[in-house]
Image (cartoon, grey):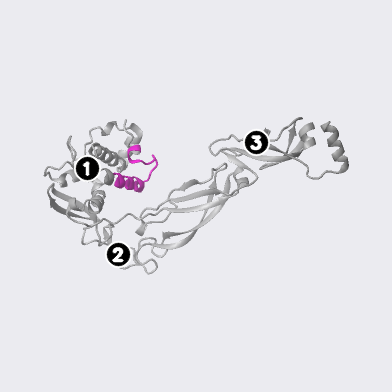
């Protein structure tokens, strides 16, 4: 079974926007007119096949449930040969019947990387990045429990005056240029034959409708920049530089279109008392010579409070003891790591006359 997600290099929960960006990048890299390696054509067809399934919501659902058995007959260009092999065929029919929503992708590729291939240099409007990325710092001592906190950030939010429509009256009219489709098609002749390229309508910016009475608050965009405050929960035991994703909490697109996601990267403040290794912690403790020789009990500071550690007789410098379940909790389970205590022996620098006499006796 082919792994379409792996082919495009995206995760199984990737958004449509992420899948589209990945396809653009790979299609540009492996297009046969640009990449002359032996396997470029085959790789290009494989990329097209993956995108044709994952870009279609219904096909993607079927693929996630049943695998790619239903898509084995897919062939870019509608035959056993690639639709990009040339030979003077009519590309417009190949794109229209087999590639569906690929036209806007290929217009990007053709105009930016293959100008000589299309015979024109018009670039399709780039998709706006609606994702918000921020960072937050927490103490090591905080992550022994879930952290509930509030974050604040500026974001493009729905205009309350026009409810996101961008219009004072809430009305709009069909774009006269694209007739409501949001795209315009251009047919260009080349040595490959007729090439039909769809691009975003510059008059309505792909929306298909024109707002004639723009809202004065948002200038017709349907959104305004606001300070957003949001309560979040950081899971216990979180690793340093872990990025948490909150779907739909990013910026909103123009005129009530879809929203991006909020990504919060968690940074753990440097703690000089402990060294972290996964869920385990390591600290050090200093003891005097009598305790090292004769043994004893000493208090140890942990993230959960002070506990007593028994030091056995004859302890040496660098000996390591374990206090179980005093480390950090697992982010994905109930287990708790251990605390390892490394012993350092303190040698006195100044001795009284009596102490010196006794140490001499011990040496003899």
Q: Main secondary structure of the magenta part?
A: helix
Quick check: 309 left or right of 329?
A: right
Residue stretch in magenta = 6-26
In depth, the one of 308 and 98 nearer the eye is 308
In depth, the one of 187 and 256 nearer the eye is 187
| Residue at (78% x, 32% y) in the render | 293
Q: Residues within 10 Å of mark 2 (few under 14, many from 20)?
A: many
Element type at mark 3:
strand
In this figure, which residue is indicated by the disc labeled 1? 32
In the image, residue 319 lies in the stretch drawn in magenta: no
Element type at mark 1:
loop
The residue most toward the right is 354
Quick check: 361 left or right of 139?
A: right
Quick check: 354 left or right of 167?
A: right
In the image, residue 20 lies in the stretch drawn in magenta: yes
In this figure, which residue is indicated by the disc labeled 3? 340
Q: Is residue 353 above or below residue 176?
A: above
Q: Answer yes or no: do the residues labelled 1 and 3 have beta carbons within 8 Å? A: no
Which percent across, then down, holds residue 340?
Answer: 65, 36
Q: Which mark is residue 211?
A: 2
The residue most toward the bottom is 216
Is residue 159 in view from this perspective?
no
In depth, the one of 119 and 144 nearer the eye is 119
């Amino acid at each position: 079974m082919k792994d379409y997600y792996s082919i495009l290099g995206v995760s199984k929960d990737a958004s449509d926007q992420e899948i589209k960006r990945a396809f653009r990048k790979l299609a540009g890299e492996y297009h046969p007119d640009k990449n002359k390696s032996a396997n470029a054509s085959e790789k290009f067809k494989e990329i097209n096949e993956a995108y044709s399934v994952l870009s279609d919501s219904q096909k993607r659902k079927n693929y996630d449930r049943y695998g790619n058995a239903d898509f084995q007959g897919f062939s870019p260009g509608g035959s056993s040969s690639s639709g990009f092999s040339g030979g003077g065929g009519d590309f417009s029919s190949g794109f229209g019947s087999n590639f569906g929503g690929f036209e806007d992708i290929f217009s990007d590729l053709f105009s930016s990387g293959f100008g000589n291939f299309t015979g024109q240099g018009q670039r399709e409007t780039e998709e706006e990045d609606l994702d918000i990325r921020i960072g937050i710092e927490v103490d090591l001592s905080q992550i022994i429990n879930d952290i509930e906190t509030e974050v604040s950030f500026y974001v493009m939010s729905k205009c309350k005056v026009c409810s996101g429509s961008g219009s004072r009256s809430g009305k709009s009219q069909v774009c006269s240029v694209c007739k409501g489709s949001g795209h315009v098609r251009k047919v260009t002749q080349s040595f490959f034959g007729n090439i039909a390229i769809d691009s975003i309508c510059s008059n309505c910016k792909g929306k298909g409708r024109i707002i004639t009475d723009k809202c004065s608050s948002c200038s017709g965009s349907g959104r305004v920049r606001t300070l957003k405050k949001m309560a979040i929960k950081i899971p216990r035991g979180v690793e340093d530089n872990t990025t948490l994703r909150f779907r739909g909490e990013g910026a909103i697109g123009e005129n009530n279109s879809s929203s991006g996601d909020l990504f919060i990267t968690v940074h753990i403040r440097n703690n000089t008392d402990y060294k972290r290794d996964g869920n385990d912690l390591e600290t050090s403790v200093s003891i005097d010579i009598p305790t090292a020789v004769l043994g004893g009990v000493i208090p140890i500071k942990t993230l959960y409070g002070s506990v007593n550690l028994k030091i056995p007789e004859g302890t040496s410098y660098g000996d390591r003891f374990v206090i179980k379940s005093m480390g950090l909790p697992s982010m994905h389970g109930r287990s708790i790591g251990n605390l390892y205590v490394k012993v350092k022996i303190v040698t006195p620098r100044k001795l009284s006359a009596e102490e010196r006499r006794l140490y001499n006796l011990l040496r003899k």
